[in-house]
Amino acid sequence: MIEKYDRTLLIKTIWLSVILHVGLIAGLLYGDFTEATKPKKNTSVAQQTKPIEATMVDAAKLQKAINKIKKQKADAKTAEKKRIEAIEKRASDAKKRRTREEARIKKLEKQRKQKEQEKIRADKAAKVSNAKAAKADKVRKQKEQEQQKAEDAAAQARSKRLKAEAAAKQADDLRKKQITERKRKEKAAADKAIQEKLIAEQMAAEMATRNKARKQQMMSEIQRFAALITNVIDQNMINDRSTMEGKSCKLLISLAPSGFVTQVRVVSGDGVVCDAAQRAVYKAGTLPVSKDPEIFKEMRNIDVTVIPEF
């Protein structure tokens, strides 16, 4: 198609060139070249010979122009031939390139189809392989899940066992600790009881000693005050040897904290001596008493024995 187009263009170009050259030649041949040869008024003979020379010159120029045109036409024809040859060469080269390109495209298309077939086979094989791999992976995951479940169950059982063992150990430790603590408390209680008993015995012994000493002190004090009271009675008593010598009287005297005599009773003895002793007590009115409340408590009802002295 390209070759046909180039030939049509070449023919049109040649005809256009021919038409232009024909027109140029016609213009040169039939143009008005005699205008310069027309005679003018008052023109000299020398001037009248100029048209002949001009005509001769114009014919030479015309031939030269014709030759130039022929040469240009030959050059144009040669150039056109070369151009056509170049166009034909380019067309041939293009055809060869197109042939090579078509061969390359066919080869590429063949390779593409081959690769498509290979890809289809590879995809099919990959699909089968993927299916097998997926199935194997599914089986593997299932086994892993089962193994994980078994491991979780074992871990839970182990955890429960460890917790049970820990709880049992804790309970056993607590029981042992409670037994140890109970024994410690029992020993401490026994030791404390023994210590308290020893302390109580020591305190009782000390208290008994103190009480005995206190009692002895109190008795001593009571005896001292009894002696003082007897002395006061003797000082206030009127004695009669004829009726009282060798006789005595035991009185029970009740006293107030101030020593005031609240009551005098005869416990035993001679009536004469007792009457004289009672009068002497009432005459005194107040008798010596201890300021110690505990001693006074023991002597608030004090008995004294009165023996008249001569």
Image (cartoon, rainbow, N blue to C red):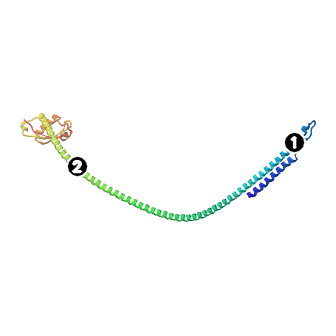
Three-letter code, disc 1: Glu
Looking at the picture, does residue 162 appear above or below residue 192? Answer: below
Coordinates of residue 148 in the picture (x, y in percent): 45, 61
Specify few, some or many for label 1: CA neighbours under 10 Å numbering under 14, 14-19, or 20 or more: few
Quadrant housing the C terminus: top left
Quadrant housing the N terminus: bottom right
Is 42 left or right of 219, judged from the image as shown? right
> What residue is shown with label 1?
53
Is 147 left or right of 4, judged from the image as shown? left
Residue 219 position by quadrant: top left
Coordinates of residue 36 in the picture (x, y in percent): 89, 41
Is 71 left or right of 146, judged from the image as shown? right
Q: Please tell me which residue lies in front, 223 or 115.
A: 115
Q: Please tell me which residue lies in front, 122 or 19.
A: 19
Q: Please tell me which residue lies in front, 13 or 194.
A: 13
**Label 1 to label 2: alpha-carbon separation:** 181 Å
Identify which residue is drawn at 18% across, 45% down.
206
SS label for mark 2:
helix
Identify which residue is drawn at 76% across, 53% down.
78
Coordinates of residue 199 in the picture (x, y in percent): 21, 47
Q: Is residue 121 visible?
A: yes
Residue 8 position by quadrant: bottom right
Which label sits on residue 195? 2
Three-letter code, disc 2: Gln
Coordinates of residue 209 in the picture (x, y in percent): 17, 44
Which label sits on residue 75? none
